[in-house]
Amino acid sequence: MSDDIKQQFWKALADSPYVMLGATGERDHHIPMNVQLDKDANSAVWFFTSADNRLAGGGPAMAQFASKGHDLFACIAGTLRRETDPAVLDKLWNNGIAAWYEGGKDDPKLVLLRFDLDSAEIWTAEPGIKGMFKLATGWTMKEGELGKHAEVAL
């Protein structure tokens, strides 16, 4: 099941690449960030941000994700690191990112963070007919009748 739910997660994240991201163990609120995906990457995603963003220093982090249709939810653990490879920056750069940085790729405020993914908990909300009936009538739900849950290594 974990490979199936991982594939569902990656598809949902590609369809709506927005997460709430924050430093692990900090009391600061998490902030919305736009995920940059690279289909060739193994267990990493990227974020463009500014040097004055509280996450720019990197470190252990967690991200929360809800799919567009609210049928998949995930909490992702990993480590943020500054990405220094100019080839990665070039590959991920696009007009949507350029709009935020007056100096373009050479803007002194520009920081590219790599989020090395360790693990995630993923939940799907896909009730079958029996689950929908129970939800509509107030009957007690049993585990698995509303969807799936998995702890996965990314």
Image: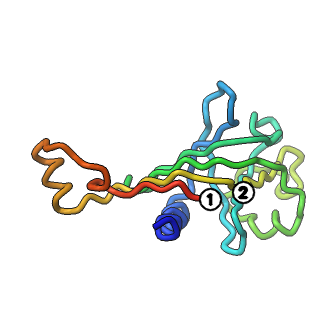
Mark carried by residue 153: 1
Quarter of the picture holding the C terminus: bottom right
Residue 8 higher or lower than 151, as above or below: below
Residue 65 position, x and y percent, is: 52, 49
Q: Residue at x 20, y 55 (%)?
A: 131
The residue that appears at 38% across and 52% down in the rendered structure is 70
Report whether 50 appears left or right of 77: right
Give the mark nearer the N terminus: 2 vs 1: 2
Residue at point 68%, 36% (across, down)? 24
Secondary structure at badge 1 equals strand
The residue where tag 2 is placed is 46
Q: Nearer the viewer, residue 82 or 126?
A: 126
Point out which mark residue 29 bears.
none
Q: Nearer the viewer, mark 2 or mark 1?
A: 1
Label 1: few (<14), some (14–19) or many (≥20) C-alpha neighbours in 10 Å: some
Picture coordinates of residue 14 (x, y %)? 55, 65
Confirm or deny contact between disc 2 and disc 1 (CB under 8 A): no
Could you tell me residue 140's position as x and y percent? 18, 43
Which residue sits at x=56%, y=58%? 152
Q: Callout 1, which amino acid?
A: Ala
Residue 44, horizontal then vertical, whole percent: 71, 61
Residue 137 lies left or right of residue 57; in this view the side is left
- Residue type at mark 2 is Trp
Tell me: residue 3, above or below residue 24. below
- The Cα atoms of the two marked residues, 2 and 1, are separated by 18 Å
* Crowd rating for badge 2 (residues with CA inside 10 Å; few <14, some 14–19, many 20+): many
Would you identify the image quadrant in which residue 55 lies? top right
